[in-house]
Image (spheres, grey):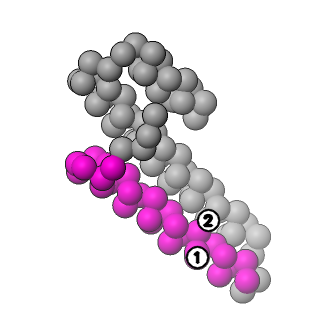
Amino acid sequence: MTVPQPRDAETTSVVNRVRRAQGQLGGVLRMIEDGRELADVVGQLKAVTRALDKAAFALLSNELRRAHADGDRPEQIEELEKVFLSLS
């Protein structure tokens, strides 16, 4: 199974989510280097984690919809379902 290329608005949205999380993570690094309060740093790390989790769920949801619409083999859909369950 491969990650779909940015071919539609949904996938582009996921790419944008990951880029935003990347920017947030850069901010967290600066916070650590600047000696910011632990609670503030941890709060931002939680925000990055949530953003990445949402991106993963969106990516997987898009791929599951595509697989069902394209009539993929049951084994392929089952593999996607296993990935989905690994996220929870």
Q: Which residues are magenta?
A: 5-33
Mark 1, Cα crowd under 10 Å, few <14 / some 14-19 / many 20+, is some
Mark 1 vs mark 2: in front: 1
SS of the residue under disc 2? helix
Q: Is residue 73 above or below residue 45?
A: above
Name the residue beneath numbered marker 1. 27
Confirm or deny contact between disc 1 and disc 2 (CB under 8 A).
yes
Q: Nearer the viewer, residue 40 or 59?
A: 59
User: The disc labelled 2 sits on which kind of residue?
Assistant: Gln
Query: In the picture, which quadrant includes the C terminus?
Result: top right
Instruction: Tell me residue 24's x, y (percent).
Output: 53, 69
* Residue 52 included in the magenta stretch of the image: no
Instruction: Tell me residue 59's x, y (percent).
Output: 40, 42
Q: Is residue 19 above or below residue 88?
A: below
Instruction: Tell me residue 65's x, y (percent).
Output: 30, 29
Q: Earlier in the sequence, mark 1 or mark 2?
A: 1
Question: Residue 44, which numbered label?
Answer: 2
* Residue farthest toward the top in the current orientation of the protein: 74
User: The disc labelled 1 sits on which kind of residue?
Assistant: Gly
Q: Main secondary structure of the magenta part?
A: helix
- The residue drawn where x is 45% and y is 48% is 55
- The residue drawn where x is 51% and y is 29% is 84
Question: Is 37 positioned to the left or the right of 87 in the image?
Answer: right
Q: Nearer the viewer, residue 8 or 25?
A: 8
- The residue drawn where x is 38% and y is 57% is 15
